[in-house]
Image: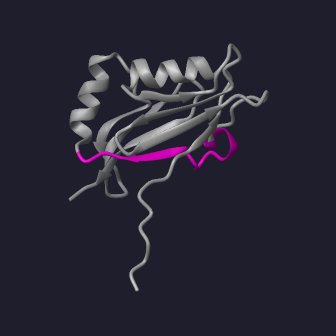
Amino acid sequence: MTQPEISSISPFFIVQNVSGALAFYRDRLGFEVTFQNPGDDVFFGIVRRGGAMIMVKDVGVDPLPNYRREPGARWDAYLYVPDPDALAAEFASRNVEFSEPLKDTHDGLRGFELKDSDGYVLFFGRPRS
């Protein structure tokens, strides 16, 4: 019997302002806003780019990225990118600031890090081949 496939996973981030978070992912990182709750009080939304989907919600508490909980836990999400060099160039053309530049890491990856509008650290990269 073959094991059923799991094709993706989506982080769920608590944010300060859903509209601001959605705008960051859309305008700075090229994601598409695929959902936001109806009405004037936007408290939940979803963005997607390729196979990556991120959910954001305002629940009335401050965001708490991993690095603020535990100094050794830098990333809140790892986004697999077949060509991190091309994506870094795209983001740089939009003046996105990297918290760690594009590089080969000591643990066998190639990629870069950035912080989103709420301080969550995203790593975009792939294993070095």
x 36%, y 25%: residue:
30
86 relative to 28 in the view: left or right = left
Q: Is residue 53 left or right of residue 90?
A: right
The residue most toward the front is: 38
74 inside magenta stretch: yes
Residue lying farthest to the top in this orientation = 40
Based on the picture, tell me whether residue 92 belongs to the magenta stretch: no
Q: Residue at x 56, y 23 (%)?
A: 21
Count of labels shown? 0
Q: Does 64 appear above or below 33? A: below
Q: Which residues are magenta?
A: 66-82
The image quarter in which residue 88 lies: top left
Q: Residue at x 76, y 31 (%)?
A: 59
> Does residue 73 appear in this view?
yes
- Percent of width and height locating residue 69: 69, 44
Quarter of the rendering occupied by the C terminus: bottom left
Q: Nearer the viewer, residue 102 or 93?
A: 93
Q: Colour scheme in the image?
A: one colour
* Relative depth, front residue between 45 and 129: 45
Q: Which residue is at a point 41% across and 67% down the rendered structure image?
A: 5
Point out the residue furthest to the right here: 60
Task: Name the side, left or right, on which 61 lies relative to 98.
Answer: right
x and y, in percent, of residue 82 in the image: 25, 48
Residues 88 and 79: in front is 79
Q: Quadrant of the N terminus?
A: bottom left
Residue 75 in view here: no
On the image, the x and y values in percent for residue 50 come to: 34, 40
Residue 15 x/y as whole percent = 65, 28
